[in-house]
Image: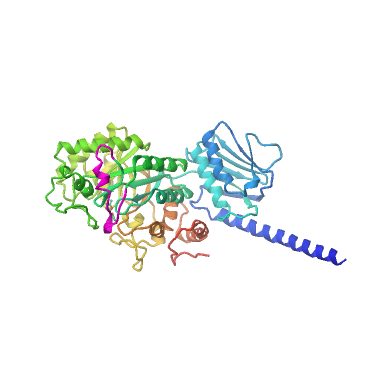
């Protein structure tokens, strides 16, 4: 009798937990559906929940190796014992089905996700679209993997990005960051459906990529950084590894070699590239002034050098783009600067790449396909558009993640603005420069310049949570986007930051839970 009562009590407790735990799981599932970032184009809640069981199947066409690779990501999200892989769903079993399907799906990066009691169906025209759908599923699940089965709220989601290029720029020249740091950065970009990492690979303080024909660029030019630390560089093999790692996450790396200005490290390594009386600095430069260096644009040897550099990088970089910098060449005479940009565009194109440059390049004659990246002077992107060029949006006042949040921020600079999290979110790329309409905007890239940024933790603090908002600006439609609604969704993303150990800035403007 006693034993019976005890069994009854234990059974009751278990039942209670089952109910309470399920309630917690369904509450989590409902909240997650409302807190997606970037916000999908449409989300329709339908009745019920998908509750995985022990026989759950993961269904994907075995012939498709890229899709198969995507599934490893998915298996990692659920407690490991639950998946059996199949090419066809067993009738009646619970399943997650990934499908490549072109019919009726919007845009090549879009996806369609339907969740019902027994089926999660993810369809997309490309493996990239499937990957973005998987990121949505990731956000629908608890940020920290538990041993209990998670629950998904039934729904239909239609989604596709607003802009083609959605990314971040990382300056690895002012301070060098290891391959491991860059990989972690790539992982964080992927979670928010960003598809571009622009690497700023050279500047006055350091040259960060091996060029076999010009070895002193890295041996000497890469051996220091701001403040005089050891610096560093990527070998071509390491660069390829970064490209591969990023590509698995549908992120493409755009390499930038900044020229003709921002080149002190190169001319320190090879003084014959210099004819600039104003660059009187002996040896390597470890300060943070800008605008004092230039390649000797009238010296033929310089163009041979550029051809070698672009050629070696183009050969290991699958991106269709090569970024030539072109900003703040303050000591290059203007007519020489224009001739230089005109000529370097042809060199880059001869290596099969489309040119990107900071917005100053719009003063030159842009070749068809050349893209201007707007950061400062609004006259420049207007000039670019007048020449038929597309524009990337990186306006310093809004998206420079090296700008301090407010006057109490210890890291960063504030020459362009203080950018609190709401300021970072509340703008429309199509409204930022009169004369540059949405159709001419190829994308949004949020740069992190690293004059004051030394460690991965520093990176994280300046980047998050602002980059989460930039990802939404680049992906989601403008209509209906507003800070008051967004800040509540953002608050929930602390769970992801915490799960990943991201040291984010806990802005007082966000109602963190
Ligand atoms: C400017 C400058 C960079 C600095 C950055 C600091 C551009 C395109 N050139 O942006 O060299 O690092 O500001 O905020």
In this rendering, does residue 255 appear at all? yes
Residue 413: image location, x then y, percent: 30, 61
Quadrant showing the N terminus: bottom right
> Mainly helix, strand or loop, the magenta region?
loop
Question: Could you tell me residue 474's position as x and y percent?
Answer: 42, 48
Quarter-wise, where is residue 407 in the image? bottom left
Q: Is residue 367 visible?
A: no
**Which residue reaches farthest right?**
1
Residue 332 drawn at (x, y percent): 16, 47
Where residue 278 appears, as percent x and y from the top left, is: 13, 52
Residue at the bottom extreme?
408
Q: Residue at x 28, y 60 (%)?
A: 415
Q: How many badges with numbers are in the image?
A: 0
In this rendered view, identify the residue nearer to me: 259 or 118.
Answer: 259
Tell me where the magenta segment starts and ends, as one range: 211-232
Residue sitting at 69 percent across and 43 percent down? 55
Q: Which residue shows up at 69% across the image and 61% down it?
A: 20
Using the image as rendered, state which of residue 214 and residue 255 is in the foreground: 214
115 inside magenta stretch: no
Compared across the picture, whether 80 is left or right of 408 comes to right
Give the colour scheme of this rendering. rainbow
Q: Residue 259's image quarter? A: top left
Q: Is residue 118 left or right of residue 347?
A: right
**Within the magenta stretch, is there residue 219?**
yes
Decide if residue 149 is on the left or right side of residue 303: right
Residue 3 falls left or right of residue 509: right
């Amino acid at each position: 009798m006693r034993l019976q009562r005890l069994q009854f009590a234990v059974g009751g407790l278990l039942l209670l937990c089952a109910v309470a735990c399920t309630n917690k799981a369904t509450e989590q599932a409902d909240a997650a559906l409302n807190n997606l970032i970037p916000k999908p184009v449409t989300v329709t809640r339908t009745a019920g929940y998908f509750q995985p069981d022990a026989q759950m199947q993961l269904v994907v066409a075995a012939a498709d190796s890229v899709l198969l690779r995507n599934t490893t990501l998915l298996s990692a999200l659920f407690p490991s014992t639950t998946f059996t892989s199949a090419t066809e769903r067993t009738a009646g079993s619970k399943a997650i089905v990934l499908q490549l399907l072109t019919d009726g799906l919007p845009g090549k990066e879009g996806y369609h996700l339907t969740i019902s009691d027994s089926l999660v169906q993810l369809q997309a025209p490309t493996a990239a679209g499937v990957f973005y759908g998987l990121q949505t599923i990731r956000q629908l699940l608890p940020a920290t993997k538990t041993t209990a089965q998670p629950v998904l709220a039934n729904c239909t989601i239609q989604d596709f990005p607003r802009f083609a290029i959605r990314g971040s720029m990382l300056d690895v020249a002012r301070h060098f960051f290891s391959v491991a740091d860059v990989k972690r950065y790539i992982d964080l970009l992927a979670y928010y459906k960003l598809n571009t990492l622009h690497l700023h690979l050279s500047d006055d303080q350091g040259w960060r990529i091996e060029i076999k024909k010009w070895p002193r660029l890295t041996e000497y030019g890469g051996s220091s950084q701001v403040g005089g630390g050891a610096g560093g560089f990527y070998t071509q093999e390491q660069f390829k590894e970064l490209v591969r790692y990023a590509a698995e996450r549908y992120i493409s790396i755009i390499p930038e070699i900044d020229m003709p200005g921002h080149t002190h490290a190169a001319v320190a390594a090879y003084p014959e590239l210099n004819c600039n009386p104003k660059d009187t600095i002996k040896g390597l430069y470890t300060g943070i002034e800008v605008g004092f260096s230039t390649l000797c644009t009238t010296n033929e040897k310089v163009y041979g050098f550029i051809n070698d550099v672009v050629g070696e990088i183009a050969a290991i970089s699958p991106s269709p783009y090569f970024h030539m910098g072109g900003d703040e060449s303050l000591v290059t005479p203007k007519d020489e600067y224009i001739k230089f940009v005109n000529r370097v565009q042809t060199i880059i194109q001869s290596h099969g790449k489309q040119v990107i440059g900071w917005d100053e390049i719009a003063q030159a004659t842009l070749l068809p396909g050349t893209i201007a990246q707007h950061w400062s002077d609004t006259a420049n992107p207007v000039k670019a558009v007048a020449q038929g060029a597309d524009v990337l949006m990186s306006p310093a006042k809004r998206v420079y993640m090296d700008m301090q949040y407010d006057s109490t921020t210890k890291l960063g600079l504030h020459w362009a603005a203080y950018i609190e999290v709401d300021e970072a979110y509340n703008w429309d790329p199509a409204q930022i420069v009169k004369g540059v309409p949405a159709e001419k905007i190829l994308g949004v890239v949020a740069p992190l310049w690293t004059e004051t940024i030394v460690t991965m933790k520093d990176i994280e603090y300046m980047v998050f949570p602002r980059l989460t908002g930039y990802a939404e600006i680049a992906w989601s439609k403008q209509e209906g986007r507003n800070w008051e609604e967004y800040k509540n969704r953002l608050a929930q993303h602390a769970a992801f930051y915490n799960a990943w150990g991201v040291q984010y800035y806990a802005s007082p403007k966000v109602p963190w839970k």
